[in-house]
Image (spheres, rainbow, N blue to C red):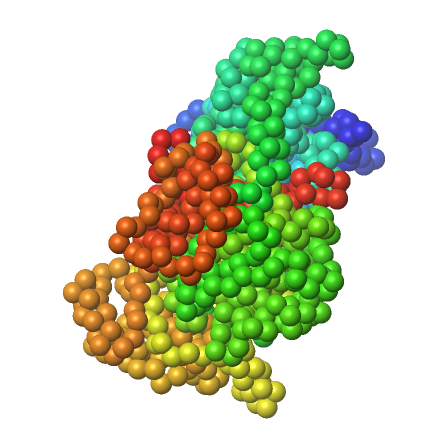
């Protein structure tokens, strides 16, 4: 059971307190917080008439020369009383009051200068986000939004000299995430001693939390909220202990003229006197409301609940749980009905009032944050925020209960004789639908698609622990599984000499398989026994002339056999096609591996289908089932891959990837705010051996460690600088392109020193450099393959065409593309999404049959007929479509995500990865 917030109220706070006048000489004990709040005294400002209440000095000017006060913009006795009182209860040496909470933040941000970097949370008040965006656009300050609930997340963004400020909230608004203020303050000060730690303490007030005691340099509150408590004034408070910061803030307030007025200072003083009393009542009631909703089965965000993920941290830094909570209903329309049905809870933005308020942040306080950013930061559209007042808790709970009943969120269960949460009305029908469809997954066609990649910075070095910056390209691999009924397995690789082969499933080396347990994951290492068994049995017919097809077949068969469950071994054909040039260093093997891993996971029921309707936008930040399998396939194809290619292929967008095991924390992190860049990818058509090139760099490192380690360190710096620039979408576009051009040139020079370039790549560089002035570098393993050229926004079309023509004349193959698009996609198999005749492209009549004449056989054709009652089969049009038509199969993408689940050993689904679902709408109601 959560501790009662009132348990904290009797703690002693050794704060600066004036001693009351007394004839007795003995010292008194420090006052408790509630006494401090009610005792407004300043020993240096005795009222000449002994007024019990601080007078309102409602004047603009003061007479005399050289006195303490001359102009209210610069100082006013009423405001001075207030600021002394605030410093006393905030463990601060200095306190300032201004016209609003946002005015307080504005004053603080004026400490920054162009080029400074700010690290801020990703769950911020909408107004804070808006102001940070403004200074990013107009002041030239770089802002990094980070999940601050894990202090380690900040480490990659803390720069010893560039990081000027870290802006924190705890609890955050409106998701009530907890931030370890003490740990972050310590970590930042160790790496960047000059950085200023700023904390928005509005959600707690000084009564429940005093961040200056935990290492913060500046704390600000919207005093409109709890400090005032009545929503009858606007005010902001800034407190600090450092004299230098205090001087800067005082100068700014006096210069700007946004200091709090005398009348508002008086009202705020009056409100603070009852702060402790109000907060005790409010958080006590909030605990009751949170437990009520939690017991009904709603997902509730409140640090007073035992299941709050950062509860232990909160107990360490705060004296109570606060009076704001939020909860999710799972349905935006239902949330709107609940909010509209309340009577005692006022529908309003803001919080901290004696009256209880209810709101939906995504359509009210946080509406200024665009929907895509809200989704990326995990802010649910159905979220309801409750700000609890001082009304009788019975009345508040009764009103909320009536609203839940009226909205249809809860109902009376006669059997249990109690109110229970109403299940989603469509959940049962969807569950039946899913059981039926998932039970027949192996009889469905599965169409998947995954992008290629371009490594912008850090190739080769990434194998040795250096961070690589990579992004997806809008050239993709497409995979299709089609069921067979003849107990055979077949593959058709159109881009590898139109290769086709089939195997009898029962003749595969099943005695060599160590199957992946249900609900388990593939081990870190390849099963070499299985690899050797497949190679020595199923692939003996494929000679050296089919080396590429043999490697792709090995990867496919390995995944098929490792994923199989017991004796369930579905017969199927897998066709792969691509708009990516194969072997050019653009991740064609990774996109193939991703398609094979996703399709086979679906066929083998390792991944189950999402419920209808299509799921909402979902932020993804972790590697999962498909990514691990794709990496295994990459190991088969390349021996020692870095892991970046398959990660980009699965997740899309742009990311920074660091391989573990080299004295650095490994992992992948998406680059938020990445904007599309235009590149010219030029295929040199020179084949290269990736394994040999990677091994060559390793050998050079062993023979010349000082040289190679120096290069690796330089490339790490390049990746870091590129990552900082790319992560800031508000950095002026011309400045971004200029920086990238310089980094491209520097990175390529290092790769030349490592010996992985090729004369053809250097020729391409020369052609793009003169007379066009463009920056070009090799990408991927080098030694041939592709070169990438950054195309400026203002590059003339006629110059671009001239460059392309020249490259073609030199027998190179250029592709104009953009980077940073979507990752793995899966075409919905639901009949509700695909209607008969709504397939992406009709069969072409001007192209002959691509597959060998004996395929498909009559049994496969019979399978087509069985599916035709639902919708037309995809394989015939897919295999006969022109390569240039393939992008049309995914045109008009949806910015949605498919939550992929894995079935654990208890037959219960668990989310393991969330994948983009980018497939096009081709007919009304179809996907």
User: Measuring 72% from the left and 31% from the top, which residue is drawn there?
Assistant: 305
**Residue furthest out toward the left:** 798
User: Measuring 69% from the left and 21% from the top, which residue is drawn there?
Assistant: 296
Position of 381 with respect to 926 (left or right) is right
In this rendered view, identify the residue nearer to me: 274 or 556: 556
Residue 66, percent across and down?
Answer: 44, 42
The relative height of residue 162 versus residue 626 in the rendered view (above or below) is below
Q: Report the quarter where the C terminus lies.
A: top left
Residue 607, percent across and down?
Answer: 61, 45
Q: Report the quarter where the N terminus lies.
A: top right
The relative height of residue 571 versus residue 780 in the rendered view (above or below) is above
The relative height of residue 249 versus residue 56 in the rendered view (above or below) is below
User: Measuring 34% from the left and 68% from the top, which residue is drawn there?
Assistant: 681
User: Measuring 62% from the left and 71% from the top, which residue is drawn there?
Assistant: 535
Query: Would residue 851 be visible to someone looking at this image?
Result: no
Residue 246, percent across and down?
Answer: 53, 48
Position of 795 with respect to 75 (left or right) is left
**Residue furthest out toward the bottom:** 703
Q: How many marks?
A: 0
Residue 926, percent across and down?
Answer: 40, 34
In this rendered view, identify the residue nearer to me: 794 or 226: 794
Query: Would residue 719 be visible to someone looking at this image?
Result: yes
Can you tell which quarter of the image residue 661 is in?
A: bottom right
In this rendered view, identify the residue nearer to me: 361 or 775: 775
């Amino acid at each position: 059971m959560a501790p009662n917030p009132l348990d904290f109220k009797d703690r002693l706070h050794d704060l600066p307190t004036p001693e009351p006048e007394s004839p007795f000489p003995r010292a008194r004990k420090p006052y408790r917080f509630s006494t401090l709040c009610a005792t407004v005294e300043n020993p240096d400002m005795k009222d000449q008439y002994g007024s019990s209440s601080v007078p309102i000095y409602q004047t603009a000017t003061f007479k005399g020369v050289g006195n303490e006060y001359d102009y209210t913009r610069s100082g006013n006795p009423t405001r001075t009383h207030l600021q002394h009182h605030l410093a006393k209860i905030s463990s601060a040496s200095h306190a300032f009051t201004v016209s609003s909470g946002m005015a307080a933040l504005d004053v603080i941000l004026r400490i920054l200068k162009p080029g400074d970097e700010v690290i801020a949370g990703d769950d911020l008040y909408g107004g804070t986000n808006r102001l940070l965006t403004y200074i990013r656009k107009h002041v030239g300050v770089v802002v990094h939004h980070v999940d601050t609930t894990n202090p380690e997340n900040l480490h990659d963004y803390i720069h010893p000299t560039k990081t000027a400020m870290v802006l924190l909230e705890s609890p955050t608004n409106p998701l009530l995430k907890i931030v370890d203020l003490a740990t972050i303050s310590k970590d930042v000060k160790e790496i960047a001693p000059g950085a200023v730690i700023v904390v928005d303490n509005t959600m707690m007030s000084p009564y429940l939390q005093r961040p200056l005691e935990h290492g913060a340099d500046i704390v600000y509150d919207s005093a409109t909220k709890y400090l005032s408590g009545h929503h009858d004034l606007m005010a902001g408070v800034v407190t600090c202990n450092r004299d230098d910061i205090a001087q800067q803030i005082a100068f700014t307030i006096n210069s700007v003229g946004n200091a709090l007025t005398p009348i508002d200072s008086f009202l705020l003083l009056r409100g603070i006197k009852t702060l402790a009393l109000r907060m005790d009542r409010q958080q006590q009631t909030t605990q009751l409301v949170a437990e009520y909703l939690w017991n009904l089965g709603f997902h509730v965000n409140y640090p007073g609940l035992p299941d709050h993920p950062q509860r232990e941290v909160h107990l360490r830094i705060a004296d109570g749980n606060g009076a704001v909570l939020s909860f999710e209903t799972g349905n935006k329309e239902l949330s709107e009905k609940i909010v509209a049905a309340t009577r005692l809870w006022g529908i309003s933005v803001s919080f901290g009032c004696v009256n209880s308020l209810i709101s939906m942040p995504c359509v009210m306080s946080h509406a200024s944050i665009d929907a895509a950013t809200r989704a990326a930061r995990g802010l649910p559209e159905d979220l309801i925020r409750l700000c609890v007042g001082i009304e009788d808790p019975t009345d508040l709970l009764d009103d909320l209960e009536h609203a839940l009943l009226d909205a249809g969120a809860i109902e009376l269960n006669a059997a249990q004789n109690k109110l229970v949460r109403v299940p989603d009305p469509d959940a049962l029908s969807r569950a039946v639908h899913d059981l039926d469809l998932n039970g027949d997954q192996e009889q469905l066609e599965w169409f998947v698609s995954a992008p290629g990649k371009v490594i912008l910075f850090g190739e080769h070095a990434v194998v040795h622990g250096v961070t690589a910056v990579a992004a997806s390209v809008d050239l993709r691999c497409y995979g299709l599984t089609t069921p067979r009924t003849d107990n055979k397995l077949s593959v058709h690789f159109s881009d590898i000499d139109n290769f086709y082969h089939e195997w009898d499933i029962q003749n595969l080396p099943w005695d060599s398989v160590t199957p992946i347990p249900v609900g388990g994951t593939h081990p870190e290492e390849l099963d070499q026994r299985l690899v050797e068994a497949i190679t020595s049995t199923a692939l003996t017919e494929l000679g050296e002339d089919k080396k590429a097809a043999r490697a792709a077949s090995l990867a496919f068969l390995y995944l098929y056999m490792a994923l199989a469950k017991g004796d369930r071994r579905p017969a199927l054909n897998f066709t792969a096609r691509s708009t990516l040039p194969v072997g050019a260093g653009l991740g064609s093997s990774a996109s193939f591996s991703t398609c094979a891993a996703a399709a086979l996971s679906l066929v083998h029921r390792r991944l189950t289908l999402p419920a209808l309707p299509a799921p909402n936008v979902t932020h993804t930040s972790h590697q999962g089932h498909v990514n691990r399998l794709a990496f295994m396939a990459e190991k088969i194809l390349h021996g020692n891959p870095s892991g970046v290619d398959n990660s980009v292929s699965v997740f899309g967008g742009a990311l920074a990837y660091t391989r573990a095991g080299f004295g650095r924390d490994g992992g992948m992190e998406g680059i938020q705010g990445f904007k599309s860049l235009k590149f010219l990818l030029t295929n040199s058509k020179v084949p290269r051996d990736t394994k040999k090139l990677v091994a060559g760099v390793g050998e050079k490192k062993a023979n010349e460690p000082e040289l190679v380690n120096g290069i690796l360190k330089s490339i790490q710096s390049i990746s870091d600088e590129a990552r900082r620039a790319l992560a800031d979408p508000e950095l002026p576009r011309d400045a971004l392109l200029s920086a990238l051009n310089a980094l491209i040139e520097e990175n390529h020079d290092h790769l030349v020193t490592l010996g992985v370039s090729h004369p053809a790549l250097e020729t391409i560089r020369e052609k793009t450099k003169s007379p066009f002035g463009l920056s070009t570098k090799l990408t991927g393993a080098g030694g041939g393959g592709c070169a990438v050229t950054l195309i400026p926004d203002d590059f003339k079309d006629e110059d671009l065409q001239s460059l392309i023509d020249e490259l073609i004349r030199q027998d190179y193959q250029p592709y104009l593309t953009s980077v940073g698009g979507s990752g793995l996609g899966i075409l919905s198999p639901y009949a509700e999404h695909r209607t008969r005749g709504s397939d992406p492209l009709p069969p072409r009549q001007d192209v002959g049959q691509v597959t060998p004449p004996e395929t498909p056989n009559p049994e496969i054709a019979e399978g087509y007929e069985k599916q035709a009652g639902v919708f037309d089969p995809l394989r015939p049009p897919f295999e006969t479509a022109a390569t240039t038509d393939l992008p049309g199969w995914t045109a008009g993408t949806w910015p949605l995500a498919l939550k992929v689940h894995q079935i654990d050993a208890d037959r219960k689904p668990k989310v393991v990865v969330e994948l983009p679902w980018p497939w096009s709408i081709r007919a009304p109601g179809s996907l």
